[in-house]
Amino acid sequence: MAWNINFTKKASKQLAKLPSRIQDSVEVLVLDLGEQGALPKNWPHCGKLKGSKNLYHCHLNKGRPTYVACWEVVDKKIKLVEVYYVGTHEKAPY
């Protein structure tokens, strides 16, 4: 069974403002999250946020500005992930 990926309204608005190459990276990340779960393989600087049980982040590109995506595992039983931030590393909520 695949994981369900939802975006908060805020994250959807943030995504729409990003460059198209970053939007493409987010699309690929969402596909990988759906297939592999909360911690997809082969993504740079991807992992759990310190001090949290269900919060994760992943860098979407190299260089400056660095874009990141942050998500939360809402429910492991029904396999639900919610993306709550997509944007620059400097403004990330962690």
Image: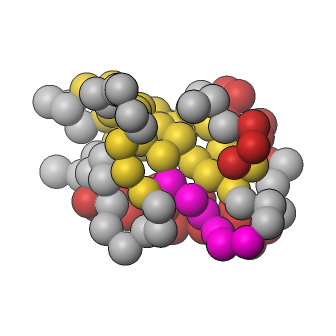
Residue name at image x 75 percent, y 43 percent: 90
Q: Give the image location of residue 21, x and y in percent.
A: 74, 72
Q: Magenta segment, which residues?
A: 58-63
Tell me which colouring the rendered structure shows. secondary structure
Q: Quadrant of residue 49?
A: top left
Number of numbered discs overlaid on the protein picture: 0
Q: Is residue 20 above or below residue 34?
A: below
Predominant secondary structure in magenta?
A: loop
Q: Seen from this angle, which residue lies furthest front? A: 50
Residue name at image x 31 percent, y 68 percent: 41
Q: For this view, does 59 lie left or right of residue 71?
A: right
Q: Quadrant of residue 92?
A: top right
Q: Is residue 70 above or below residue 33?
A: above
Residue name at image x 47 percent, y 68 percent: 44
Q: For this view, does 30 lie left or right of residue 25?
A: left
Q: Is residue 90 above or below residue 10?
A: below
Which one is nearer the viewer's eye here, 45 or 21? Answer: 45
Answer yes or no: is residue 8 visible. yes
Which one is nearer the viewer's eye here, 83 or 60? Answer: 60
Q: Give the image location of residue 61, x and y in percent.
A: 64, 69
Residue name at image x 69 percent, y 56 percent: 67
Answer yes or no: is residue 34 visible. no
- Magenta residue check for 40: no
Q: Give the image location of residue 43, x and y in percent.
A: 43, 68
User: Which quarter of the rendering shows the C terminus?
Assistant: top right
Which one is nearer the viewer's eye here, 7 or 39? Answer: 39
